[in-house]
Structure formats: C-alpha cells, structure tokens
Image (cartoon, helix red, strand yellow):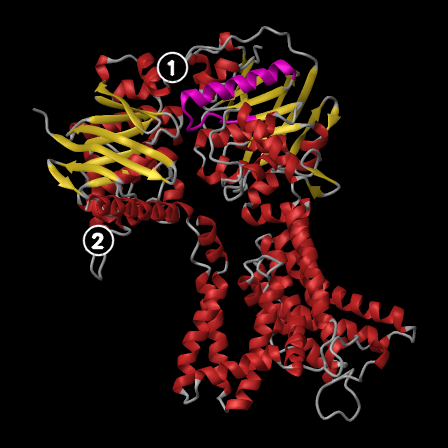
Amino acid sequence: MKTFALQLDRVSKVFGDFRALNNIDLRVVAGSIHAILGENGAGKTTLMNILYGLYQPDGGSITLNGQPAVIPSPSAAMEMGIGMIHQHFMLVDTLTVVENVVLGLPGQGLQLSLAEHAARLTELSQTYGFDIDPHVEIWKLPIGMRQRVEILKVLYRQANIIILDEPTSVLAPNEVASFLEGLKRLRDAGKTVIFITHKLDEVAEVADRITVMRLGQVTAETEVASITTRDMARMMVGRDVVLTAFEKPDTPPGPLRVVARNLSAIDNRGIQALKDVSFEIRSGEILGVAGVDGNGQAELAEVLTGMRAPSAGSLAVDGEDITALSVYDRRHRIGLSYVPEDRHHTGLVLDFSVMKNAMLRDFRVAPFSKNGVLDMRRAREVTDAWVKQFDVRLRSVDQAVRFLSGGNQQKLIFAREVECRPRVMVVMQPCKGLDVGAIEVLQRAILSERQRGTAILYISTELEHILNVCDRVAVMCAGRITGILRPQDATDARVGALMGGISEAESA
Amino acid sequence: MLDIIRYVYMLRPVWAVLAALFVGAGLIAVSGVNPLTAYSELFSGAFLDYYGLAGTLVKTSPILLAGLAVILPLRAGLLNIGVEGQIYMGGLFSTFAALLLPPMPAMIHLPICILFGALGGGLWGLIPGYLKALHGLNEVIVTILLNFIAINIVSFVVGGPMMQEGAPYPYSDEIGEQLFLPIVLPGTDAHIGFLVGLVLAVAMYFLLRFTTTGFALDTIGSNPQAARYAGIPVRRYVMLSMFAAGAIGGLAGALEILGLKHRLYHLFSPGYGFDGIVVAFMAQLNPLFAPVAAFFLSGLKAGALVMQRAVGLESTVIEAILGLVIIFVAASLAFTYNRTFWKLLLERRRQVEADLGASMGEK
C-alpha cells in the first residue's frame, strides 16, 4: 500500500452563504507530484490555505503522514514540514537572496552568520540544480529566479510537502520548461509537491496524480497517465471545451484606423523601453503582439492609451493625430478602450463595489451621470445588465469587487470596456491566470468586437491565444517590433527567432 | 439582526468616547473628586446652560470647518495636517481685507473679507498640493512645516508692521464694527460661524456622494493608478482638493477673526486645525457626521473649563481625558464590520437554540 503524505477527508469551508469547499477528499502520495486542477473559483486556493493553516476547516479531518493533524497557523504548518509558495511572491526586493531566505527563520538567537547561511544555501541550490547566487538582490533577478528563491526558502526550512499556487502564471513561456524540470528534481529528491494550476499541458507533462475540482467539489482523482487533457478539461469545466481555434468569420478588414509611427518611450527606471515602433491596424482587424514579457509590451500599451507619453513618434486614429491627447480625451473622444494587464492595481478599484467599478470608465458621461451628478439608478440597471450578459458570478452588485474571483473580475472589466462601443481597443494579457472557460468567453468577446469593426491590439505572452484570434502577429523584442507575420506563417521556429531578436523583413 | 450589528459598528466612535469617559472617570476619582459630579458639571456646562452652549458653539465653528478641511483631501488620500497654518493665513488675509481696503459698504466689504480669508488659506493649501502633484513631495511633511511658517508670519505681522500702537501684546487694530459677524444667541459670542460650517458639511456630503467629482476623489484615494487608467486628471484633483481644503481652513480663520476676536492676535488659534483631524476620524470621513463630532469635541473643551472651576479639578486631568478620547476613537477605527463572522455566529447560535429546543422537547 502506498503511504499518503497527506490525506483529507470530507473537508469543508463556508464563507457566509458560500460553500467554498464541500466535502473534499484528497490523497497525496508521498514523493509524487500531485496537481490540483480547477477553474477560477473552484476552491483550489481555499483548500491550499487550509493546508497552510491560514484558514480553519469548518468540517472534516486532515491526516499528515498517517497522523491526524490540526494546522492552526502558517508557522505551525512550517514546523510540520509544509511549505507554501504563493502566486504573488513574498520577497523583499531590496534584500539579497540569502537575507530573504533567513528572514523570519526561527532559532537564530542574537547573532546571524549570513556567510554560513549563504554557504548552506549554495549547497542546497546546487543539489536541486537551481544555480542561484545567494548574494544578489532580489530586484536584479528575473521572475523565474525569484520563484526559485521562494522554493529555496521553503526547502531551507526543511519542508517535505511543497505547495505551489499557480506557479507558472507569472512565468514567461521560456521559463516554464525549466521550472517544470525543477519540480521533477524535487520529486526525485523525495519531496512531495502539490501544485495548483489550470494549465492542462503542464499537468500532463509533470504530474503523477491529479485531483480535479469544480465548484468546491472534487470531480475526479486519478493517475495522470490514465486520462487525456480533453477529459481533464471536461471534468474541470463540466462540459466539452473547444481548445482548438475559433471559427473566425472571414470578414475583410476595413479602412486604416490606427497608425503608429516611430514610437519610442522611456520606462519608469529611465531606460528606453520602446524603440522606433511602427504599425497599422485596420478597422475590424486584430493585431497580436507576441514576445517574452518585459520587452516593451507594457510601455506600448501605455503609450497607446495615453498613460505614458512617448519620447518620440506619433499616433493617429482615423487620420487624427492623438499623440498629445489625454487619457480622458482618448477614452471619450476617440473611443479607446483598454483592458490592462494588472487587474488589481490598474483595471479595478478593489474596495469599490462591482457597480462603481462598472462605472469607472464612463462615470463622467451618460448614462452614468448628467451634468456632473451621478445617476445611481441607471448605473445599477446598466451594471445588472452587464453582469447577466457577461455571466459575472457574484452575490450582489454592491459587493466589493475584491471578493470576486479573477475570472469574474476580468469579465467585469471586459463588459465595461466593450459595452462603451469603442473604436480602438488595447487588450493586454487578458487571459493571464484564467481558466479555459473564462478564456473562451473573453476571446469570443474580442472576436465579436472585431466583427463590429473595432481595431484591436492584442498583447499576450501566450502565442497560442494570439494565434487563436489575431489577423496578424507582431513580435516584440527589446522594445522593437522584430517582425509582423500572418498567423499561418507564424511557426514556432519563426516566432521564436523573432522573439530572440533576429529581425526579418515584414512579411505580411 | 445583521443590520443592527452593522449600525453598532458604524457608531463605534460613540462607544469609544463613552469608554474614554469611563476610563477618565477613574482618573477623576483618583484626583479625589466624584466623577459623576464632575461629568454632570461638564455636560451641563457645555450643552445645557445658555452661556455654556454659546461657548460650545463658538468653538464648534473653527473645529467643524477644520474637520471638513481634513475630510475633503483625505477622501483623495491626502492627509492635510496643515489646517492650523491655513487657519492662520485665512485670519491674516481677512484682517488685511478688513483693515487695509478703502472704506466701502459693509454689504460688500464683509463678503470680501471672508473671500480673502478663504483665498489666503486656499493658496497656503495649494503649496503642498502643487508640490505633491508635480514633484511627489509628501504632503504630510510639507503641511506640518507650513504650519510653523504661517503661525510665525502672523506673529511677525501683528508684532511689527500691523501691531496696534501701544498694545501690550502683539495684536492688530480692531476691525470696523460693521464687519462683525451676526450673533445667533443674543448676549453671547455665538456667531453664525457654526451655521456656515453646517451648510458646508451638507454641501460636501452631496458633493462626495452624488457627483462625478466625489467619485473621482474617492477613486484617487482608493487607487491612484486606476484613477489614471480611468482618465481622471489625478494631478489636477490633488491640487484642487488641497486648494479647497485650504480655503475651508482659511474660512475657519476668517470667521474666527470676524466673528469672535475682531482683531488679529498672535497665536489666535489654540490648535483648532489639529482638532479637525480628530473630528475627521470621529466622523469616519463622512461630512454629515462631522458637525456632530465637532459639536461634541467643542463641548468637551468648553465644558472642561466649567468642570475645572466647579469642582476644582486640575486642568491636566481634563487634558488627559481629552487625550483618552482621541486615543480611543483612533483605536476604535481598527474594528471593522465583518459580515461573514457575525452571520456565522448568529447561525451557530440559532443552531444551538434549535438543538436545545429539540432536546427540551424530548424530555
């Protein structure tokens, strides 16, 4: 009989009226990689927070290494050998790797020998092939490396069960492979890895066993080898999901709408992040922007939407030069919509109600206000309609938007940015951290905007998503557009070369 | 039931004040005075006695306006510690207008004096607003420092260029009697200042709750990045709200001079600007609660003097009690209403009661 590192029996958790977890059974084999798969709001994160002692279950029992266990707090979880790596890193940017690892380490007394810790850390990181210099400040490290620091942090505390909450959602595509390798090395060293995700291909690649969750319940627990990704998707969403390309109506693009000429811009650190970028988007056309994260895509979106002033170049919409226009004028006079990358800090005011967030873009114009006075009754009607139309799941429109799941937050943003009938739309990483069901809804919304004649710039690091919806694909590297391709020409090899900065003549 | 609990939470500054008074009762008892006598003297002196009430209203005027001057920018996330300085500049400017302008009918002259005061405070508030909006300077530090400058400018002016000849103490000439503000309670000092504050409080409530300006300010206060994303001109609103706050502070100073002091004194405000911060937090940034909070705080201050005289309590004890009120109110804000928690608790109780009922039935 296999030994279970962790066993959950009929664990439940209730928030108000909402049953986040309903009689969850979970068995994790020691020394395996166990994936927990589910849509946003399926209860994965709640479950992990219970394992890490952040929440207490309202019912059920937890068995750890054969012993019944109660996990009262994260520090107790740590002592029991459970380590957690959150989706958003808990690192101090200005401290070095070893300082971050030692931070909060119990039993240090009055003296701290950083050198000794650093030596042990180096040894540890070599064991797992992590290759990290313990004396580098965190802010100098790329995201993938920071994640390794987080993993080292829990390993250093002798964790035997390592929980990772959507670890790959923050990684660039080229970092994912090496991350998954790292997971395998952890398993080979005898650690138990629990990893929460909604990316099917990753599960198929590394996981040994899988638990699929849906609406707070476990729908399946099985060996990965015995199941196809298609089945996983069905169990996760509760119906068949089209994973392949959408049927894109073959409407010819309309007249030239957006013309960007030689745009350059400086980023927040004073470095030139956008260099001489030119492109055109026609009405009813989707221009995809692919590339490794951090190659000027964010600055490009900001320059287009007016949140960052370009240092050179010009931007025109329907022949009108808008280079100097304010965000307000772009939004209301030009009809520009923007779905930003960062929902929490840019796209939403988390403490505002759903209704106020729905008003955020257009609260100064009809129907939300008249002569500077808000019309709350109309706003409520409009919000109710949007919530229905975009299937935003919530308790009430007066609920703070903070308490919606990521997918529902994004649907609300889409409703707001699409229902104002824009002429130009900038969409950045709209599917980041979302499950297949929500992605489908959003991509359909984008395509129906295209159908309506909107010129759309679709920025994403997920080439698959771009190829699904775009008419042309621009690839960015180091602040430049290295090439613009038609989807049928965008082979992995060609796009990979362009992402790496090997330019070729525009071929579309 | 949940609604009742929510209201209990909304009233937490009230509970905090009561708790502070309770602890203060201990202090009074230690000083050898019966706390009940002391408090009844305090409250009857502050609210029940005609002249005492007038004294409370006189203090309510600057404290309420100062509270509003803190609330408005705080909704946009700006902590205006500079109301004291804005009061001084308002007093200075309105005195200028009262003493230096050529003679004209009071009907015109009085509004000009008030506007000058508001303008003086507004410009003084615009300095930190401008520095914050365009250079990112911390408004807390700038406003604190500007307080000292404003207080000393007034001291210099009334101690030198504008000092009344032969005055024993730094103060200016008296302003013309036609410029005195109307008195509300005959035979007392209670001028119309607190009514002005009341009207402004209601106006500010509607502004913040029902207009796009209020929406924009709240958005900036909650998430400036999202405000920029929504196309709200954040810098303009930062400057505007600090100017408006300064103008309200300046108004407080102007009304203090025109309504009560009738001449510019050095150190004429005993920290009303800082009382405004307390009012803002007691009112939980809701302008509609500000008059209540200001009236109560003024009552404590006015009644303290009465209590001191009546029962011979050390004034330090009274100051300690005022300090307790502030600490308790600040601490009470940490208790936030958690719907889920209370709902669960109530459900469990109902469950227990149901079980009990069932077991009783079995017997």
Is A447 part of what is drawn in magenta?
Answer: yes
Q: Amino acid at mark 1?
A: Arg
Point out residue B181 in the picture as x, y percentages from the top left corner. 79, 75
Look at the numbered disc 1 and give the secondary structure of its residue: loop
Is A385 part of what is drawn in magenta?
Answer: no
**Magenta residues?**
A427-453
> Of A134 and B84, which appears nearest the observer?
B84
Q: Which residue is mark 2?
A: A106
Judge if badges 2 and 1 mark residues of a common chain. yes
Q: Within the image, what quadrant is residue A464 found in? A: top left
Above or below — where is B189 with respect to A460? below
- Mark 1 belongs to which subunit? A
What residue lies at 84% left-to-right and 71% top-to-bottom? B110
- Mark 2 belongs to which subunit? A
Q: Main secondary structure of the magenta part?
A: helix
Q: Which residue is mark 1?
A: A239
Calculate the distance from the C-alpha at mark 2 to the C-alpha at mark 1: 48 Å
Q: Quadrant of the C terminus of chain A?
A: top right
